[in-house]
Image (cartoon, helix red, strand yellow):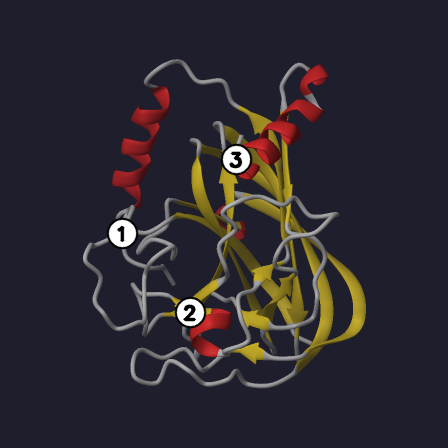
Amino acid sequence: MRACVWAAAAALAATAGTGRAGFTFSTGDPDGKIATAARPDSAGKIEIESADDFVLSAPARITSATFTGLVTGGGTVDRVSVAIYRVFPKDSADPPSGRVPTRDNSPSDVDFAERASDAGELAFGEVVLSPTFTAANSVLDGINPIPNVFTGGEGPVTGREVRFDVTFTTPFDLPADHYFFVPQVEVSGGEFFWLSAPKPIVPPGTPFSPDLQSWIRNGNLDPDWLRVGTDITGQGPFNAAFSLEGQAVPAPPGAVLGLVGAAGAAGLRRFRRA
């Protein structure tokens, strides 16, 4: 049995006695190696998306999530969104544009599903883990197409370390597949940076295979993506700090295929909204 299937099966079995099997996943605690910007477009700010992956070996309803990052400049959090992407070339133009070194194992061009606090689709709370935390490197503005992909990063960044606890009031009902988790935080008077987590994943995280690295893009790079550690900083691949919880969703034969088709068609829209 492949490691990804084993990990998901173990998580499902852990709560099988509750009447509906549970799903849990985590990349573990932040390691402080890098922090990547993740924000929606807003006045004077271009959108930036950071992505890290997870696998579902069976259909699941994702009801809650956490992710941990830095809020800089004493900023105030205005809204939070979470998008789910599948792996390229799903939901994408293929072949790609050729503006980045590769699209192999990247997130797709457009999201598969999204939930946002200002639409009433999720609720969130903030837990300050540390009033001051510094990541050794960061990516904010240095997100460029070929030939200016490599920047080495933008150096250390410091802010308050915040864990966002998210409840999806409209849950994600996802078929079995390989996905990317993409959170965004709008901050007035500062920035949000998503913190990295160990790669390979170690306990208390949930190891799985294949564990892809974290990717990033901004509105100018859309629909392409860059590998944070391989393309931009040269530090090697990273994960990002997040966790998921939910329940298994038994599906009759053919239901998953129908859901994939409907959701895929609905998801073929431009990179993001205001």
Among numbered discs 1 and 3, the one appearing first in the sequence: 3
Question: Residue 162 falls in which quadrant of the image?
Answer: bottom right
Q: Secondary structure at mark 3?
A: loop
Q: CA distance from mark 3 to mark 2?
A: 36 Å
Q: How many marks?
A: 3
Locate residue 264, reporting x and y percent: 29, 39
Q: Which mark is residue 2?
A: 3
In primary-sequence order, the first of circles 2 and 1 is 2
Q: Could you tell me which quadrant the C terminus lies in?
A: bottom left
Q: Quadrant of residue 245?
A: top right
Q: Position of residue 227 (x, y in %)?
A: 44, 67
Q: Which residue is mark 2?
A: 47
Q: At 59% across and 70% down in the image, what residue appears?
A: 193
Numbered badge on residue 161: none
Disc 1 marks which residue? 269
- The crowd level at tag 3 (other Cα within 10 Å; few <14, some 14-19, many 20+) is few
Q: Measured along the vertical axis of the image, is residue 30 above or below residue 158?
A: above
Q: In x, y percent, where is residue 86?
A: 38, 46
